[in-house]
Image (tube, rainbow, N blue to C red):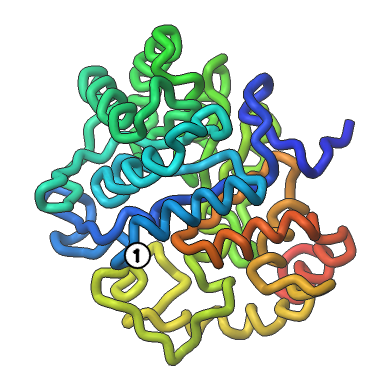
Amino acid sequence: MTTPFHERRLGNGGPVVGPMGVGTWAMGGPFYAGPGWVLPEGTALGYGQTDDAESIRAIHCAMDCGASLFDTSDAYGTGQGEEVLGEAIKGRRDEVVIATKFGNVHDRATRQLTGADVSPGYIRQACESSLRRLQTEWIDLYQLHLGDLPVEQADGVANTLDALCAEGKIRSYGWSTDDPDRARKFGNRKNASAVQFQLNVLNDAPDMLEVCTDCEFAGLNRGPLAMGLLSGKYSQDSQLAADDIRCNPPEWLVYFDTGGKAAASLENSLEAIREVLTSKGRTQAQGALAWIWARSNRTIPIPGIRTVAQAKENLGAMDFGPLLPEQMKEIEGLLGRRE
């Protein structure tokens, strides 16, 4: 049975959320690695300065354009991302599905991430804090934000999350990880509904898509626009502020070179597929989102926004729908991947 394009669902029996969500990482403002975190102290982890009022307008615009799933984390701006989303959905809570994350310990006073904790007591404390910042009585999707958590700890985390489901604090849960084996650990849990992983036209993830099919998970796709690279707004001449993670990118952030320049290693790939992505009047960003929808009927890209203009462009991709099978095949050939 073919799933209609406009129907995406959290898990097998969860809410229908539509084909596109919205990410709020960039709405959290500047925050940094602190002592005890995995990156060197002082490493920028946000997208630089932001305007909360414009962020709220962008969320309202996204809702009006058909978005219902909003993804955030208690780590984004050490809570600011959740607070902005909470303010934006006042009076409209029943129109949205909220996905947030836990696992990173943070210090709001210094805007630093300072460690990790998945003990039952901490998970409960983090959940209550997120509920307060989001100004809601429940979280629709609560996600483990530690992608490399030792797999032997997964059952203990899931047991605590199952208890929170039973208490009505959360309605389902998932794992934000790019490792298929970790993602499958929640596969036999009735309250697990999703896995969040990186997916875009330059960075395919067939093993993670297979997990989504096998476990009947929704696939929330972070980095669908390669952290902005696929928007077409960045080049080898770009310069980003020091408080933007893309200015001094960690090893895993392959889309930008030091200073915020578009990665030279990807220029040829982008040029090769640009014409296909911009077919039928799409912008390059809209074409990149269309590739994700064509890749699997379980995908839900969550491109980040912080302006009304970004919301309109990204949500406008739904008017075009997925790329056609022959376009998908052409892209694979141009990138030297599958036939």
Residue 159 pos. (x, y %): 38, 14
Determine the residue positioned at 79% across, 55% down.
Answer: 321
Determine the residue positioned at 84% across, 66% down.
Answer: 327
Determine the residue positioned at 67% across, 19% down.
Answer: 13
Residue 101 lies, with reference to residue 312, above or below; the image says above
The amino acid on which the numbered mark 1 sits, given as a three-letter code, is Tyr
Q: Nearer the viewer, residue 35 or 309?
A: 309
Residue 141 lies, with reference to residue 170, above or below; the image says below
Residue 52 lies, with reference to residue 63, above or below; the image says below
Total marks placed: 1
Q: Quadrant of residue 324?
A: bottom right
Residue position for label 1: 47
Residue 265 pos. (x, y %): 51, 81
Residue 38 pos. (x, y %): 22, 52
Q: Residue furthest front?
A: 91
Q: Quadrant of residue 3?
A: top right
The C terminus appears in which quarter of the rendering? bottom right
Determine the residue positioned at 10% across, 48% down.
Answer: 109
Residue 250 in view? no
Crowding near the residue tagged with mark 1, few <14, some 14–19, many ≥20 C-alpha atoms within 10 Å = many
Q: Nearer the viewer, residue 176 or 16?
A: 16
Q: Residue furthest top?
A: 166
Residue 332 in view? yes
Q: Quick one: SS at disc 1?
A: loop
The N terminus appears in which quarter of the rendering? top right
Q: Is residue 175 left or right of residue 121?
A: right
Q: Nearer the viewer, residue 261 or 269?
A: 261
Residue 36 pos. (x, y %): 13, 47
